Image (cartoon, rainbow, N blue to C red):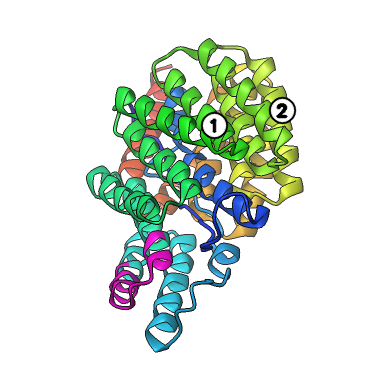
Amino acid sequence: MKRGCLSVLAIARASIPVGIASLNASFYAVAALTLQSLVLFASTDALCQSVRSGIGTIDLEQQLDIPLNNGIQGEDRDQADFLLRLGGQAQRRGDFEKAIANWLQALDLYQKIRDDEGLGLTYDFLGVTYAKLGRYQQAEDALRRRLGIARSRQDFQGQIYGLNNIGTVLLQAGNLEAAQETFTEALTIARSVKNREGEGLSLSNLGLVAAGAGNYFEAIKRYETALALRRSSGDPVGEANTRNNLGDAYRAAKLQNDAVVSYRSALLLAENSRSIPDQFRALRGLAQSYLASRQYLQASKTLNEHLTLAQTEGNRREELISLRLSAQLYKTTGQWIHARSFYERAIALATALGETQEEAFLRNDLAQFIYYRGAR
């Protein structure tokens, strides 16, 4: 299974039990689905080749500003929270190692003051970021520690999303059987406590397992069931995520028109709910669906929209995706000057970001293109 991509988790730091506060429930839902938001690129080879080295981030500021309700105060607590925010800012810039360093310092402080909420949140951030870097054993260890905290507190909602996040790491590592078992356990808990958000997420992730196994029509079935739950629970961000999943499955099944419809719906939901990661996903999916169906004008317009969003958000990794896909578009349509320009811009950006694998891929692709043209 090819390496996919993960987006950094954002979990509400609230100790209120399941069912008491819908606001906290919605933040828990955002938490797990952001971890899933890019892993689905493993469901199709073409898309996985277009997104390398865990490209993709999410704005953590809103979640990080949520106050803790555990009564712990003091200098250590303030410093730990400050480090958590610094890590979020570094992650948004794409500096994952700096983010990890800040979060490890925060972890030490939360352990010192025995702040379980802070520990759980920090383990979430660490786990997902380790996974983005392909450090799956460290990712799984951090997320299992987070799950242990949820279980010790009888936090069923935390267990649901903790299991979904662990399942995602297992899926990333190519362990489909273990991922299936983990998502199924999450689904069982969600149903037992009547948590429709968690049930929708777990079903959506079970769709990822089916897609990862190449069973795209089974994945489509699971996604459609998950969509009904996410709509009924008023979860537009979750619905956007699952519609992106559905678009990926349609595209893998070579149903490009259905994929376009699904991605368009995801984009509208993401724009209305201001979910930037899902906007990026929907635009990528749309561009690749248009490319696959030879609708080159639509592909170009969509890639321009993607590039504008990336530049507006200051997201250089998404900008790299735009440049790379644009280079491929112009190569496909035989527009040599434009293709070479986009390849060179993409290579320069990959170099600046330290994306060595992406840089090597781009250089090889450009060299083959030059050779092919010279041989004609």
Residue 314: quarter of image: bottom right
Determine the residue positioned at 50% across, 52% down: 57
| Label whose residue precedes the other's in the sequence (1 or 2) | 1
Left or right position of 310 against 115: right
Q: In which quarter of the image is residue 373?
A: top left
> What residue occupies the far left of the structure in this picture?
137
Say which residue appears at 51% left-offset and 56% top-offset: 11
Between 272 and 229, the one lying in front of the other is 229
Q: Distance between the residues labelled 1 and 2?
A: 45 Å
The residue singled out by tag 2 in the image is: 297
Q: Give the range drawn in magenta.
A: 104-120
Q: What is the x, y in percent for residue 102?
A: 35, 71
Question: Does the magenta portion include 306?
Answer: no
Of the pair 92 and 138, the residue shown nearer to us: 138
Residue 354: give x, y in percent of width and height: 33, 55
The answer to whether residue 200 is seen in the rendering is: yes
| Disc 1 packing (10 Å; few <14; some 14–19; many ≥20) | some
User: Which structural element holds mark 2?
Assistant: helix
Which residue type does callout 1 highlight?
Answer: Arg
